[in-house]
Image (cartoon, rainbow, N blue to C red):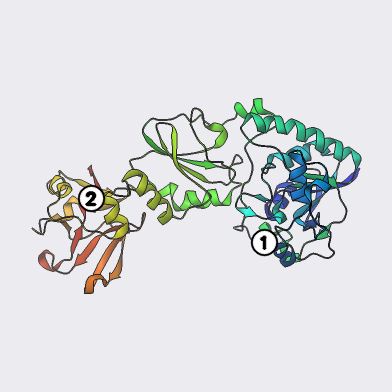
Amino acid sequence: MILEIVFAAGCFWGVEKNFEKIEGVTQVISGYAGGNYDNPTYDEVLKNKNLKNSSFVSFLQNIGLTDKSELKIDKELVNHTEVVKVTYNSDKVSTESLIKNFWEIHNPTQVNGQGNDIGDNYRSALYWTTKDQEAVALNTGQKFQKLLTAKGYGKIVTEIKQLDKFWPAEDYHQNYLVKNPNGYCPDHSTGVKFDSSVEVQNTHEVIMPLGGMEILVIEAEDEGSCLYCLQFEQDVTSKYKGSIPLRSAPMTALKGFDLKTPTWATPTIFFIKDGKEIWANQGYMSPSEFYKALGEFKLGKKSEAFNVAFNKGTDARFCKQYDIFKNTPDGIFIDKLSGRALFDTRDRFNSKSGWLSFTKPVDGETYEKADNSFGMKRTEILSISSDIHLGHVFNDGPNGKPRYCINATVLEFVPR
């Protein structure tokens, strides 16, 4: 039998992609539903968000205010939410499996939004077309609520009602992620699954606290499904060689950590000390954003090293770190945050300036930038990987070579 059902789980692009890959689903169309005005457009739905609407009423009803007269809400325009209409062959895929998938791919406890997408146009909703679908939605919702509660989540606020009218979205929204493979597709899932016994015994390696400082990058449960996770892997994780351990894993692989920040927006980056969350960020971070946060975590915001790295400060001449580094054995000086090689002892020389001096950096690891501060014309040297300030380059090195005048406090040393 061919049936239709409508789901709303945040931005419809990713929801459409999710249901299209399920065997037995014959068609998925992005659109709008749940509102009380005709012919909605994308711009109108955005413009009308956050009004006193049915999703707000539904939320208040769910927490005990069941009589709409008690709410004292005037009759106003009810906004639509972004939805997908799923057409499926019930002989090949069950209604229950589709609805369970719906619960699992988003956070049904978040009011008027999913992740950082805030507004009633992103509210969680299920619009059924048969009484059987309604019964399955209510039954699975009750079961999923127990699983969510066990994981510390709040009450489900999903709007569940009969479909009134479905309005197809504009053409450019249809199959958006096929046309734009790098387009917006966040993972808003809670990580909670119906078959929790299978989830616990998944194929992911169990991640336990290492003790001391460490970095955790929480990725989507479905490997490869989160484009921002892949982007963070490409921009940061794959290049990181710092002394603080960095590991990536889905939330279900973690055991024994004390974490407070929700992980519905992947990647979620945690800075951990002795198994306890010190700082966290939901969503993608650029390399410069990540390393500035790491600088506060590792160096301390009031440290000399942080001031040099992020405020373009300068070490004192003949500082303690300079004395430690000026006569090291053969080896490499690395970026204190990213761990990337920056300078080689083979290119070091004693300029008698009181700062570490080199005739050249490691190829491809630094970049130059004009610095006209303090009324001077200088050339600043920065790390490509972390974007931290390293020092300046001058043209008075030995034998006509440059002199890279580098602050020791932003470096670490590794023997060759």
N-terminal label among 1 and 2: 1
Classify mark 2: helix, strand or loop. helix
**Quarter of the figure with the N terminus:** top right
Q: Position of residue 345 (x, y in %)?
A: 18, 50
Kindly identify which residue carries mark 1.
179
Q: Secondary structure at mark 1?
A: helix
Mark 1 and 2 residues: CB-CB less than 8 Å, in contact?
no
Residue 323 in percent (x, y) is at: 12, 47
Q: Position of residue 400 (x, y in %)?
A: 13, 69
- Which residue is label 2 attached to? 409
Question: Quick check: 22 above or below 252?
Answer: below
Q: Nearer the viewer, residue 415 or 206?
A: 206
C-alpha gap between disc 1 and disc 2: 48 Å
Left or right of residue 16: residue 342: left
Q: Is residue 91 above or below residue 373?
A: above
Mark 1 or 2, closer to the camera: 2
- Nearer to the camera, 223 or 212: 212
| Residue 279 shown left or right of residue 188 in the figure | left
Residue 273 in view: yes
Residue 334 vertical position relative to residue 367 in the rendered view, above or below: above
Quadrant location of the C terminus in the rendered image: top left
Figure quadrant of residue 278: top left
Amino acid carrying mark 2 in the image: Thr
